[in-house]
């Protein structure tokens, strides 16, 4: 077998492996679930790292470094109670879209967050 044929076969095998790996990792990952998607999963997505997105509702409280708040879907139908341990971003405000990282406790219906990302509003607002 010539060197060119071996190079083509080896390159093809590497290309196929990369494509399969990319497909498996892309199809297996969801960046985040919205509240309704998370609550409707059967069986519930417990004991695994998740991201969930929702709008911050009024009525959050803080006890030390622990925050208690509620998020809801964009359609306003589904709500989720959240316990967050740690600091919150400066942009943590009522009505903002949040992406929370943590684990879902399906037994108690609570999302235990360890990181909060506040989504950008999408429009430029100049600072005056």
Image: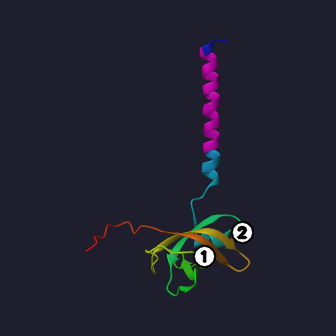
Q: Which residues are magenta?
A: 4-22
Please say if 80 is above or below 61. above
Please say if 25 is above or below 5. below
**Residue 109: x %, y % from top left:** 68, 79
Using the image, tell me which numbered label, if any, was put on residue 85: 1
Residue occupying image coordinates x 60% and y 78%: 82
Residue occupying image coordinates x 63% and y 49%: 25
Q: Nearer the viewer, residue 66 or 18?
A: 66
Quadrant where the C terminus lies? bottom left
Residue density around tag 2, few if under 14, some if 14–19, many if 20 or more, within 10 Å:
few
In this view, the mark in front (2 or 1): 1
Secondary structure beneath dot 1 equals strand
Q: Earlier in the sequence, mark 2 or mark 1?
A: 2
The CA span between labels 2 and 1 is: 18 Å
Q: Which residue position is annotated with label 2?
A: 46
**Residue 17: x %, y % from top left:** 65, 36
Residue density around tag 1, few if under 14, some if 14–19, many if 20 or more, within 10 Å:
some
**Residue 8: x %, y % from top left:** 60, 21
Please say if 72 is above or below 53. below
**Residue 40: x %, y % from top left:** 66, 71
Is the C-beta separation of discs 2 and 1 under 8 Å? Answer: no
Secondary structure beneath dot 2 equals loop
Q: Quadrant of residue 5?
A: top right
Decide whether residue 49 is among the magenta residues.
Answer: no
Q: Nearer the viewer, residue 93 or 88?
A: 88
Is residue 43 left or right of 12 when viewed as pictured?
A: right
Residue occupying image coordinates x 50% and y 76%: 55
Decide whether residue 5 is among the magenta residues.
Answer: yes
Residue occupying image coordinates x 69% and y 64%: 48
């Amino acid at each position: 077998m010539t060197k060119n044929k071996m190079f083509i076969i080896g390159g093809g095998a590497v290309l196929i492996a990369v494509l399969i790996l990319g497909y498996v990792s892309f199809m297996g990952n969801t960046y985040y679930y919205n509240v309704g998607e998370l609550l409707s999963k059967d069986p519930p997505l417990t004991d695994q790292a998740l991201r969930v997105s929702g709008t911050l509702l009024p009525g959050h409280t803080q006890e030390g470094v622990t925050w208690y708040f509620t998020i809801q879907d964009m359609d306003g139908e589904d709500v989720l109670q959240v316990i967050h341990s740690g600091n919150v971003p400066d942009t943590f405000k009522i009505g903002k879209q949040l992406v929370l990282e943590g684990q879902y406790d399906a037994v108690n219906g609570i999302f235990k967050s360890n990181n909060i990302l506040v989504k950008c509003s999408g429009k430029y607002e100049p600072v005056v």
